[in-house]
Image (cartoon, rainbow, N blue to C red):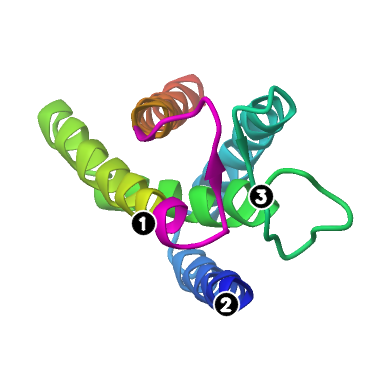
């Protein structure tokens, strides 16, 4: 069952990535996607190496301890959609949408942890997920605004 969930989310993530990159400005989307991937791989590796959580079932289980699918596809695609939906938003709108996107991801993780072997908390909690994902999406949003001001 876990492999079906993982492969299904992989296919959905690739489809969402394809559709999100069809809009312009493509360079912004690529920067957001790659920057989010970079930061989440570093954070995810640290969390797994510190044994705060584990991924008992993975797609690429022979090669990686962390969940590359989440760190290099799911989270960057969600961050990309977050940026696209907040492109013309005020600070309040960005904050509220950040809470909404983060809540949805956190809820999905809670359900996966509780009912499957996709993720297993050791010292990690859902609150750490919420705080880290929220911080990441806001940080990436601020980063791309900084890039725009410098160019």
Q: Nearer the viewer, mark 1 or mark 3?
A: 1
Q: Pick the residue in front: 91 or 28.
A: 91
- Percent of width and height locating residue 144: 45, 31
Mark 1 vs mark 3: which is more N-terminal? 3
Q: Nearer the viewer, mark 2 or mark 1?
A: 1
Classify 103 as above or below 39: below
Judged from the image, the secondary structure of the residue bearing numbered disc 1 is helix
The location of residue 13, given as percent across then percent down, is: 52, 68
Q: Residue at x 54, y 78 (%)?
A: 8
Residue 131, given in percent of the width and then of the height, sits at: 36, 25
Which residue corresponds to the image point at 57% horizontal and 58% vertical from the top-left? 118
Q: Is residue 32 left or right of residue 108?
A: right
Tell me: 86 left or right of 140: left
Label annotation for residue 11: 2
Residues shaded magenta: 112-126
Read off the residue under disc 3: 67
- The reply to whether discs 1 and 3 touch (Cβ–Cβ < 8 Å) is no
Q: Position of residue 147 (x, y in %)?
A: 50, 26
Seen from the viewer's position, the closer of residues 56 and 67 is: 56
- Determine if the magenta segment contains residue 119: yes
Which residue is the site of mark 1?
A: 111
Q: Compute the Cα span from label 3 to label 2.
A: 15 Å
The foreground one among 108 and 120 is 120
């Amino acid at each position: 069952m876990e492999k079906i969930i993982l492969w299904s989310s992989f296919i959905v993530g690739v489809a969402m990535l394809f559709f999100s990159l069809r809009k312009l400005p493509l360079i912004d989307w690529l920067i957001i996607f790659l920057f989010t991937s970079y930061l989440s791989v570093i954070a995810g590796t640290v969390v797994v190496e510190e044994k705060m959580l584990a991924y008992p079932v993975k797609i690429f289980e022979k090669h990686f301890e962390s969940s590359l699918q989440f760190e290099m596809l799911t989270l960057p695609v969600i961050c990309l959609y977050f940026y696209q939906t907040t492109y013309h938003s005020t600070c309040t709108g960005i904050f509220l949408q950040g809470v909404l996107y983060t809540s949805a991801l956190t809820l999905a993780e809670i359900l996966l942890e509780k009912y499957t072997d996709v993720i297993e908390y050791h010292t990690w909690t859902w609150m750490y997920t919420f705080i880290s994902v929220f911080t990441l999406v806001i940080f990436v949003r601020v980063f791309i605004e900084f890039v725009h001001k410098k160019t």
